[in-house]
Amino acid sequence: MRLMPTAEGKPIWFELNAADQDAAQAFYEAIAGWRIASSAVLEHGGYQVAEADGKPVAGIRRSMPEAPGFPGWAVYLATRDVDALSSRVVELGGQIRFGPVNIPHVGRFAMVSDPQNVVFALMNATRPDESRAFGPVPLGTEQTIGHGVWIELATPDPEAAFAFYGALFGWEKLGAMPMGGMGEYAFIGRSDLRPGAVMSSTATGAPARWNWYVHVADIDAALLTVRERGGTVLQGPDPIPGGSYSANIADPAGNRLGLAGSRQAA
């Protein structure tokens, strides 16, 4: 995967807050094909790092008493100045939920929420250009199996979300796909970054949250493994532009994640 400069707002990391790290490790190694091991840095306190192609893409941490209220997967978005952008979040009607704090040998981050109380993280990584957590789309343009390839915001107020994230990252509405009675699936980003989309949680019934999609080699095999491992298939597989398919799952603890990939049997 080629070296790319990290744009403001680019997804740079994904993290699961898990009550049972070992159970989460076993499940996601089977689903995403990750190799997961505890960080070699003692200060990280047993933080588990998931790798694809030998590149770190996601982390699994124990639930922290000092930072409650962040169950499930969190999306980390890059910024050059965590403190300044955290203050901007508050100015725009959001909240700082935890931090900003430094992570030894990693960078500085804060957990924040937008005006609709959707949580996400801001991060200024020590070596931001080295992040391979998020790969380009459409699928197949580069080797992205096991990497994040799309992010998706379900929110009760899409227009307010566009205003908030537009002011924060300079994102714009870059077209939309109508979904009938469920509103529209509106694409977000700017010329140098098109990471995902926004949709109405009220119209679709999806929980208000940031979701992310990991690229799997065979969507049907992955969904079969989800069921075999005690998880739940919530949606899909459904066709997406480019000939691939998407699905949404919940792991045995109820944490939700998106999957995207081809149908090998098709």
Image (cartoon, grey):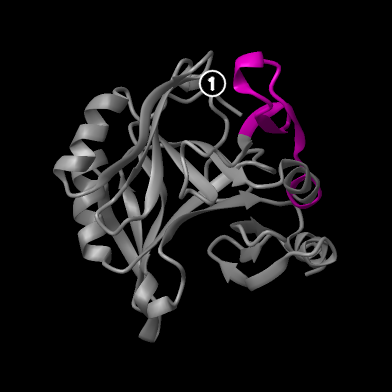
Three-letter amino acid code at the position of disc 1: Glu
Q: Is residue 47 above or below residue 60?
A: above
Q: In the rendered view of the protein, which quadrant contains the N terminus?
A: top right
Q: Residue at x 33, y 66 (%)?
A: 176
The residue positioned farthest toward the bottom in the image shown: 181
In the rendered view, tell whether residue 204 sits above or below residue 261.
below
Q: Residue at x 32, y 56 (%)?
A: 117
Which of 47 and 224 lies nearest the eye of the viewer? 47
Q: Quadrant of the C terminus?
A: bottom right
Residue under the image location 55 percent in, 47 percent down: 149
Q: Is residue 63 left or right of residue 23?
A: left
Residue at image location 62% in from the left, 49% down from the top: 214
Q: Is residue 70 magenta?
A: no
How far across and down, in percent of the image, does residue 182 sit?
Answer: 38, 80
Could you say whether the residue bearing mark 1 is in a helix, strand or loop? Answer: helix
Near mark 1 (Cα within 10 A), the count class, few <14, some 14-19 or many ≥20, is some
> Residue 243: percent from the left, percent from the top?
62, 63
Q: Is residue 14 above or below residue 245?
A: above
Is residue 135 visible in the rendered image? The answer is no
- The location of residue 122, given as percent across then percent down, is 37, 34
150 sits left or right of 243 in the view? left
Which residue has dot 1 on it? 130
Furthest-right residue in this view: 228
Write down the quadrant of residue 154 in the picture.
Answer: bottom left
Of residue 264 and residue 259, the one placed in the foreground of this image is 259
Residue 133 in the figure: left or right of residue 97: right
Which residues lie in the magenta part? 28-57
- Percent position of residue 112, x then y: 34, 42
